[in-house]
Amino acid sequence: QLAELSVKFGKPFVDAIEQNKAEHAADCARSCELFYCADDSKINQWDTETHLNTSFASYSFGSVPPEDFSDEFKFPLDLIKVTEGAPLFSAEESAQVIHQAEEEGVDKNEYKSGKYKLGGDWLVNLPQTRTWFNSKLEHTLFPLLHHVFPELIRSPSVLRAHSVSLLKYNHTHPRTDVHIDNGILAMTLAMTPQSDYTGGGTFYEHMGVDNVLPMDVGHGTFRPGSVRHGGHRVHSGTRYILGAFLLLEDHVEHVRRLKNRGSELRTGGDLQGAMNHFEWALALNPRCTTCLKDWGEILVSQKDFVQAEEKIRSALDMLEGLDSDALFTLGLILSEQGKDEESITTYKKSIELNAEDAELCYNLGIKLGEKGDKRGEIMMYKKATEIDPQMGGAWINMGTTLAEMNNLQDAELMFLKAIECGGDVKTKGMMNLALLFQKKANDLAPSGDLSGAKLAIDQAAELVDEAKPMLDVKMALGGDSEDAMYASQLKPLRVQIHRMKGQILAGMGDLEACEAEFQTASEKFGDIPGLWDALARVRDLLGKTEEAKQAREMLAAIRNSL
């Protein structure tokens, strides 16, 4: 097949294949520097006598085969293997390993993976933990893998531990997103008793989000790496797992490596190079659904929604509709094409598969809001912020919708939450909260609550004044369309705030303070005729005839210049 495709695609394809081989050899060599590698002359086999009480439950891999070597895996056999009965190591041994890892600082580290921050660290940074793991590779794990996948693994000596991490899940680092693993094989070892935490557990998307495979401390799951799976949210306690991606020294995964390089090229801005790699990977494996999805996302970025829809629907057909990410992308494509009803239906299907996707809930909230379903919109924003409390856009949209429903009290809390998120969303939260306080002042003043109105308008002024320098910096650096919208609101909103405060002060009988307010406003915004007119009138009321005349002269000069 490689020879035929080399003729079809020419030198760029041949170079990519050679690069795959070189990278594979380098990865395998690096693995042996860090992790146990067996010698053919001295290998351990899985001892059924020693592990007499350990058995394996097998589960379906789903409708799509492994990305590479599906024939050797004997797909569609049940390829997800989970140990049952006697564990591979005891709870006491695991507790000792965790204690040792914590002494090495594993519980103090975190890093980003997908949409979530994970606690834990790579075993390359945990030498004592790695020593324990290497012993397990030699005596238990490599022999076990050879035993459960004999058609693919000719000997334990070809196995290579490529990327290995010890992960810590708790209420602050609760879960992973749905993903595939970066290796021909992957393993997950449970390092914590189930009694130590609530929630948690691994699910496979094609089996359903609520179908968590049981795995207590000392047990493991072994599978091809390309099956979509995720971790359920840990609500309390601590759950440790050890995850490893594996290579086979005598099997180069051309599909996975072409796909990965395509993703790297896409990130680097070489979209054509990325699409070429996805095309080559699909030529090797026409059922590489990740290749289709990644290609489709490039087409979305190029606004080629028709071809993007074709790629994503092809992937979903193969996956029997069981891929929340593909459904999310399809929902986005349909939305961009103005197919709102189909978009909403598709987003809802995605949520059925993975209700813990904050961005998905956020997008569905937007679509429901556009259709006038305010209750459904707020429910989705609420769900998004429960999943990711730092999703400032959802807090802002929820606050805006509540304000439109005249629920200013709850809207205020939402905007405050957005401001707490910081970053790019902080100024947007501040401007929206300023508008809310302005509305509160507008509502309170006619009812006679001038003290409450003054407090509200002062809060609005403080927020706008704090937001202005931040927005100025953003716009100087380019800013986005929303930044530009809020920046354009700064002057008219601040003028309205000055006017309203002046009117409130006049209503309270404090004409001196009223004059000072309009004096400040006219100095800051000298091109606004109405401010000079208001200043002249309040000075008339104070009997400051000469000062009133000066204000009117400024008013006349501005009007003559218009």
Image: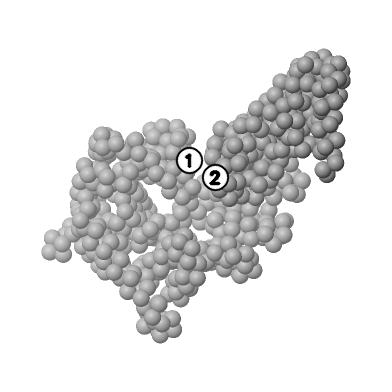
Left or right: residue 400 versus residue 18 is right
| Residue 509 in sight | yes
Quarter where residue 546 is shown: top right
Residue designated by label 2: 356
Q: Please tell me whether mark 2 sits on a helix, a strand or a loop.
A: loop
Q: What residue lies at 82% left-to-right and 43% top-to-bottom?
A: 561
Q: Residues within 10 Å of mark 2 (few under 14, many from 20)?
A: many
In the foreground, 149 or 312:
312
Q: What residue lies at 44% left-to-right and 84% top-to-bottom?
A: 8
Which amino acid, mark 2? Glu
In the foreground, 204 or 304:
304
Left or right: residue 72 versus residue 35 is right
Residue designated by label 1: 233
> Do the CB atoms of the residues marked 1 and 2 lie less than 8 Å apart?
yes
Q: Earlier in the sequence, mark 1 or mark 2?
A: 1
Where's the N terminus, which quadrant? bottom left
Which amino acid, mark 1? Arg
In the foreground, 300 or 145:
300
Quick check: 500 above or below 379? above
| Residue 86 in sight | no
Furthest residue toward top: 509
